[in-house]
Image: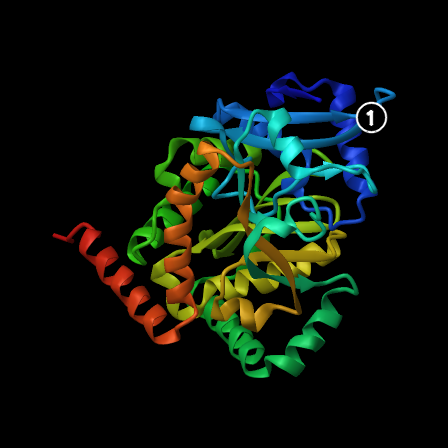
């Protein structure tokens, strides 16, 4: 096994990665493609890839990770990568602790480990639903599902779309918007939303902004940046930036102009996005983990992702546990008690309002 920087992967290595991922039979999530690791490697200097070879010398697997202090490792792009894990040859016999040792890691932490990652699943501390929209049979079939499971939601959203058109101008949707100014607008909306709801502003971190901007220009069969925008007249009112493969759209950063909130432009955007994605050959939209009313209304099913850490006995493992497990348990305690969760959310929103700049 060799450990290299993502940028040191050769063309043959990248092609082998793609072939192994395709043979895995897992959904073609773009976060699991080499292009995502390459992009993270440009903005995260501690990004690495473990290249696993057969005794014959042929490629057997790849584990992208980020190396921290005391040998503590994390999934590559930790905090923004929605699907994580190793890309391995089917049937490969491998021990997680031996892999960590070979990588020089005392622990490898994940927060969105994908399904079928048998190497690391036994070390998961929590599991979460990742909500998906299945449009594999076309948008019309999906709309029939919505009419059955969420008839009021669909009826209300379509009525709001018509009203938006009457009040603000013709509603139009662009699946693949190439104007960088539209991406900047989306990031400004999203940052304001994070602050308004008392959450950590991801785009305040330079590396996340740089990563999104780089992926916006990435074009590869398995991983391309996709910016989708909903317009009313000539004005953008909602947008989403995510990553797509040929068949999967990983929903990443949706946001809207709060001045148009009464029209629910984010919901309109998601319906338009589902229709256009189906027409473009995408079979599944993955809205990611985290409960939300709009996800409940839009979803057709769920995948499972896992949070936890694989560790090797030693000082590094103890430090990893001390640094992470108490807060994880506290989050779990609150999340499993709706009344406490509601109080916590309202507290975050009040804190967000206090941080908002006062208007003159």
- Relative to 341, is 192 above or below? above
Which residue sits at x=63%, y=59%?
304
- Relative to 207, is 346 above or below? below
Q: Secondary structure at mark 1?
A: loop
Which residue sits at x=75%, y=23%?
13
Count of marks placed on residues: 1
In the displayed image of the protein, which residue is found farthest to the left?
360
Expressed as whole percent of the image width and height from the top left, the position of residue 288 reads 56, 56
**Residue 57's image quarter?**
top right
Expressed as whole percent of the image width and height from the top left, the position of residue 54 reads 82, 26
Judge by depth and name the residue closer to the eye, 178 or 105. 105
Asked whether, in this view, residue 44 is left or right of residue 99, the answer is left
Q: Looking at the image, can residue 13 be seen?
A: yes
Q: Residues within 10 Å of mark 1 (few under 14, many from 20)?
A: few
Q: Looking at the image, can residue 74 be seen?
A: no
Which residue sits at x=50%, y=40%?
78
Judge by depth and name the residue closer to the eye, 180 or 295. 295
Which residue sits at x=57%, y=32%?
65
Asked whether, in this view, residue 346 is left or right of residue 354, the answer is right
- Relative to 32, is 150 above or below? below
Judge by depth and name the residue closer to the eye, 79 or 313. 313
Image quadrant occupied by the N terminus: top right
The residue pinned by badge 1 equals 54
Expressed as whole percent of the image width and height from the top left, the position of residue 128 reads 56, 60
**Residue 350's image quarter?**
bottom left
């Amino acid at each position: 096994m060799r450990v290299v920087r993502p940028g040191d992967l050769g063309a043959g290595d990248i092609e082998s990665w793609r072939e192994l991922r395709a043979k895995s039979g897992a959904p073609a999530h773009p976060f699991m493609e080499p292009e995502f690791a390459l992009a993270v490697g440009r903005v995260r200097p501690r990004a690495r890839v473990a290249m696993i070879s057969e005794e014959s010398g042929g490629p057997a697997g790849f584990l992208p990770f980020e190396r921290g202090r005391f040998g503590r490792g994390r999934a590559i792009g930790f905090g923004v990568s929605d699907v994580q894990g190793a890309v391995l040859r089917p049937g490969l016999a491998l021990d997680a602790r031996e892999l960590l040792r070979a990588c020089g890691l005392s622990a490898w932490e994940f927060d969105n480990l994908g399904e079928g990652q048998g190497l690391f699943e036994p070390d998961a501390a929590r599991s979460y639903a990742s909500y998906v929209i299945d449009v594999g049979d076309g948008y019309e079939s999906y709309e029939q599902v919505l009419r059955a499971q969420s008839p009021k939601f669909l009826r209300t959203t379509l009525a709001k779309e018509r009203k938006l058109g009457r009040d603000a101008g013709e509603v139009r949707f662009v699946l693949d918007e190439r104007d960088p100014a539209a991406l900047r607008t989306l990031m400004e909306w999203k940052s304001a939303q994070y602050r308004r709801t008392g959450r950590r502003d991801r785009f305040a971190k330079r590396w996340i902004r740089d990563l999104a901007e780089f992926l916006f220009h990435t074009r590869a069969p398995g991983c391309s940046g996709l910016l989708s925008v909903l317009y009313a007249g000539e004005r953008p009112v909602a947008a989403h930036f995510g990553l797509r493969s040929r068949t999967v759209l990983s929903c990443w950063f949706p946001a809207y102009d709060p001045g148009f909130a009464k029209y629910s432009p984010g919901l309109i955007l998601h319906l338009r996005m589902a229709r256009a994605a189906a027409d473009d050959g995408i079979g599944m939209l993955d809205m990611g983990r985290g409960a939300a009313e709009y996800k409940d209304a839009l979803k057709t099913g769920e995948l499972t992702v896992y949070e936890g850490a694989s560790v090797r006995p030693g000082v590094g493992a103890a430090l990893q546990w001390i640094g992470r497990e108490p807060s994880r348990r506290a989050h779990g305690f609150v999340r499993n008690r709706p009344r406490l969760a509601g109080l916590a959310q309202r507290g975050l929103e009040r804190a967000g309002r206090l941080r908002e700049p006062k208007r003159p």
